[in-house]
Image (tube, rainbow, N blue to C red):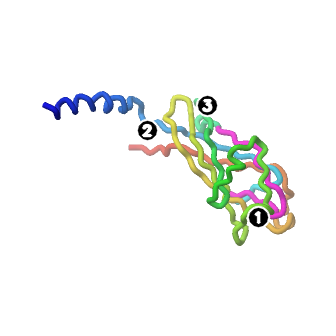
């Protein structure tokens, strides 16, 4: 009898944590990061190692032109190390290359972890890296380009497979 009473006491808590929504309805968005004082080429952002790279904005748009979307609780990482000063800064965010711990051969990563929200979709958590290549001088930038505004766009979404 005691076991039955304990089971009846647990039942309301079990029902309280059940979900009625479809967890397979994940956001499908494009995330565009805009940088200043950089060059975008070959799927990476190039910057001179003594310059200050600026992250001037992050725009989240629906991939299928449906409902609006946004990133929340954004946290930044540089070469897998947390950068709290970037996480709580307003745009533009200055990233002084001379002060950043750079890896050999200039292949660095700007990591972003965030909560991804889209209207009428399940909440999701996303994590992605943007390759940041540092070069010694402006003459080493790809294609002889000059530093300026550069964008990096990636798609975050649920893959669609036919059954």
Give SS at disc 3: loop
Q: Earlier in the sequence, mark 2 or mark 1?
A: 2
Relative horizontal placement of residue 152, taking residue 143 as reference (left or right): left
Relative horizontal placement of residue 120, taking residue 139 as reference (left or right): left
| Residue marked by disc 3 | 68
* Tags 3 and 2 touching, CB below 8 Å: no
Nearest the eye: 101 or 129: 101
Note whether residue 107 is visible.
Answer: yes
Q: Residue furthest bottom?
A: 104
Nearest the eye: 139 or 95: 95
Q: Taken as a whole, is the magenta stretch helix, strand or loop?
A: strand
Q: Between tags 2 and 1, which lies in front?
A: 1
Relative horizontal placement of residue 23, taking residue 3 as reference (left or right): right
Q: Position of residue 57 (x, y in %)?
A: 74, 42
Asked which quadrant contains residue 139, the reply is bottom right
Which dot marks residue 59?
A: none
Q: Which residues are the magenta region?
A: 43-60
Q: CA distance from mark 1 to mark 3?
A: 34 Å
Asked which quadrant contains residue 49, the reply is bottom right
| Residue marked by disc 2 | 24
Which dot marks residue 134?
A: 1
Nearest the eye: 126 or 24: 126
Image height check: is 38 above or below 138? Answer: above
Q: CA distance from mark 2 to mark 1?
A: 39 Å
Give the residue displayed 65% in from the left and 43% down from the top: 31
């Amino acid at each position: 009898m005691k076991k039955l009473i304990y089971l009846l006491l647990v039942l309301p808590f079990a029902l309280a944590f059940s979900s009625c929504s479809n967890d397979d309805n994940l956001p499908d968005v494009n995330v565009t990061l805009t940088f200043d004082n950089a060059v975008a080429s070959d799927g990476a952002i190039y910057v001179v190692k003594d310059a200050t790279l600026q992250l001037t904005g992050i725009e989240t748009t629906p991939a299928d032109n449906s409902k609006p979307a946004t990133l929340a609780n954004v946290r930044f990482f540089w070469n897998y190390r947390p950068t709290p000063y970037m996480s709580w800064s307003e745009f533009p965010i200055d990233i002084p290359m001379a002060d950043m711990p750079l890896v050999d051969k200039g292949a660095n990563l700007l990591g972003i972890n965030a909560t991804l929200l889209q209207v009428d979709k399940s909440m999701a958590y996303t994590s992605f890296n943007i390759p940041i290549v540092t070069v010694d001088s402006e003459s080493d930038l790809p294609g002889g380009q000059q530093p300026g505004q550069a964008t990096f766009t990636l798609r975050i979404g649920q893959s669609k497979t036919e059954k």
